[in-house]
Image (cartoon, rainbow, N blue to C red):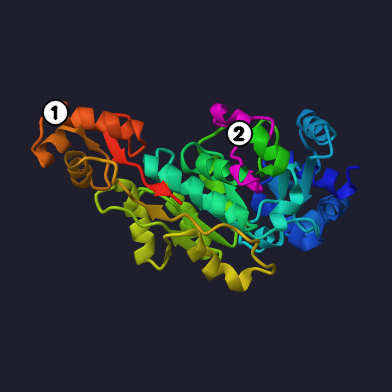
Amino acid sequence: MLRDDDLAALTLLRTQGLSDGLYRHLLTNFGTAAEALRVGVAGWRASGVATKALGRLGEPDQEALRKDLDWLAQGDNHHLLSLGHADYPPRLAAIADPPPVLFVLGDPQLLNSPAVAMVGSRNPTPNGREDAQAFASYLARCGLVVISGLAEGVDGAAHEGALQANGPTVAVCGTGLDRVYPARHRELAHRIARTGALISEFPLGTPPLARNFPRRNRIVSGLALGVLVVEAALRSGSLITARQAMEQGREVFAIPGSIHNPLARGCHALIRQGAKLVETGADILEELASQLDFDIHPSPAPAQFTESFDDLDEKTRHVLAVMGYESVTVDTLVERSGLTAEAVSSMLLVMEIQGVVASAPGGLYYRQTKRL
């Protein structure tokens, strides 16, 4: 059953021209959305609301409000969390600019659970994608909620890793919850909603506007105890999230990479600024141990990396050695190894079949790190 204050919260949310700042101002002065509406124009004016905004308060877009109410009535997994109420996530309420309301599709209790956010490039390297999935899987097996933003790349890999470990994951969306963006993550979003939660501060019908995605990043970090950056360029939304996490007093973790990888430079910059360098999920748990109010669930050891190429001949091992840990072209391998292009191509084919290397777009090949 919809509470009176939820209806009041939606009424304020659907009032045209009412900013989040003014919404929070009303809550600060009157305690709840219902009380803010009850006091009327005289109370609003006394609280410092500008004259030009007085006429709009309490006059929402009725059609939009009806859509919100219809969505909430669709099932027990449709929820509205209002700032100022006990069910609103306390970590998020403590940030400087918490969203006045959260739409939740799934389990709202997960927003109160110990969580780690994971962010990174929308176009990660193959190894970066695998790292995101492996770290998320380990953290989920240890009992932590994995939070990310449902975007392509690292976000999607993080959600997938948590789901594969049968752990909960929360997706913070940059649209209304009646839409999925990107569209290719529709099936992923449905799986997240079944065992985790999709959340958004944006009302139903909100399209994927570019300005909304940087805005939702404060929620990604605000719900978590810490934020892990997997891969990020020097100018990226992931670094914005990391900066907001620092401002919110959250731990920031970064996975280092090659100095030749542009997507490692953002992580290296964060490490220079004080982020914790991590190589395994256990490094994260060690830093967060004092903030966890539960015993870590028994879990297999965190991802470890191993290489054993005893079944490869000497020339093939040589090609693998000169490949290093970067994505390289056949021409680069020919130059480094001194072998012919035909010989190198043949060896790459054999190693790809054996799972030792993998191909990437642009005619690139990279070493497959095997996880134990």
Which residues fall within the magenta stretch?
A: 164-188
Mark 1–mark 2 Cα distance, whole angstroms, equals 41 Å
Residue at image position (33%, 39%) is: 356
> Can you say whether 75 is above or below 171 in the image?
above
Q: Can you identify the residue that label 2 sits on?
A: 188
Q: Can you identify the residue that label 1 sits on?
A: 341
The N terminus, quarter of image: top right
> Can you say whether 64 is above or below 126 in the image?
above
Q: Which mark is residue 364?
A: none
Badge 2 marks a residue whose secondary structure is: helix
Is 29 magenta? The answer is no
Question: Is 203 left, or right, of 120 in this rendering?
Answer: right
Q: Is residue 359 visible?
A: no
Question: Is 136 left, or right, of 233 in this rendering?
Answer: right
Image coords of residue 290 (percent x, y): 60, 74
* Mark 1 Cα shell of 10 Å, populated few (<14), some (14-19), many (≥20): some
